[in-house]
Image (cartoon, grey):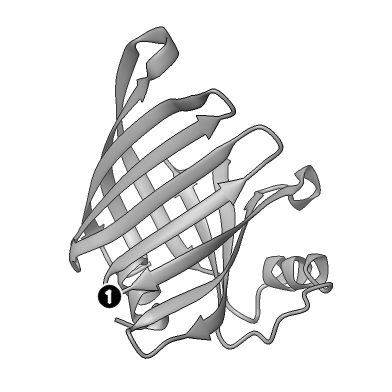
Amino acid sequence: MNILNFFYLTEGEWLIQQTVYILHLKQHFTQQGKLIIKEITNNNNLMNSILKELTNLNYQIKNIKIYEIIWNQNLDNSSIIVFFEINKYANNLITGIVYKFDQDLSKGKLVGNFNLQYNILKINFETKNLIIEEKIWLANPNLKLNTSIIKNNKGCTNIAFGSAIKVNSNL
């Protein structure tokens, strides 16, 4: 699967259930909600602002995809994800850079890398104190699964598993 097809299939409205386990507290919680993933197009002022923010890239960008992700229709719980394809290999492996912004671009960003092979997207972010590893795969066009692991310098702190069912592709 190429990167453009993968992102095309993730666009839409999803019903999601996620379980998070916090290791040091030995507690877990489950949350349910609606996740909306929609592409930000070239004609959008937000996209232009993001591209200005990222003008210092020293990569040859082959494909760029920018998505807004909204949790439970609350813009305060939304983020912007930017994917830049850097390399494509013969074994269907695609690698690149990923940026994650809050809705308010001035609050900073997370910078990481991704690789996509077949229908599995792996994203890694590193901050000063944390490493965040996320894996997203499409079991089929209407079923998305994900795992997340958050680590600090002492080891794993949080583990999450989620499943999502697409309820609407037309946004």
| Occupied quadrant, residue 83 | bottom right
Examine the rendered structure and indicate whether residue 34 appears above or below residue 21.
Answer: below
x, y percent for residue 165 = 20, 52
- Extreme residue toward the top, this view: 25
Residue at coordinates 72% horizontally, 47% vertically from top-left?
Answer: 104
> Camera-side residue: 119 or 80?
119
Location of residue 127 (image quadrant): top right
- In the rendered image, the quadrant that contains the C terminus is bottom left
Viewer-nearest residue: 67 or 99:
99
Mark 1 is on which residue type? Tyr
Q: Can residue 83 be seen in this view?
A: yes
Relative to 43, is 96 on the left or the right?
A: left
Residue 116: image x %, image y %? 39, 71
Residue depicted at x 36% and y 53% = 135
Q: Say above or below: 25 vs 139.
A: above
Can residue 75 be spotted in the picture?
Answer: no
Q: Residues within 10 Å of mark 1 (few under 14, many from 20)?
A: some
Q: Which quadrant, please, contains the N terminus?
A: bottom left
In this view, the residue in front, 49 or 26, is: 26
Name which residue lies at 57% across and 49% down. 125
| Left or right for 55, reference 10 | right
Which secondary structure, mark 1?
A: loop
Residue 162 percent across, percent down from the top left: 27, 41
Specify whether 56 is left or right of 37: right
Give the quadrant of residue 92. Answer: bottom left
* Residue at the disc numbered 1: 118
Q: Which residue lies furthest to the front in this view?
A: 154
Pinpoint residue 137: horizontal percent, then vertical percent.
Answer: 27, 60
Residue at x 47% of width, y 56% of height: 123
Count the labels in the image.
Answer: 1
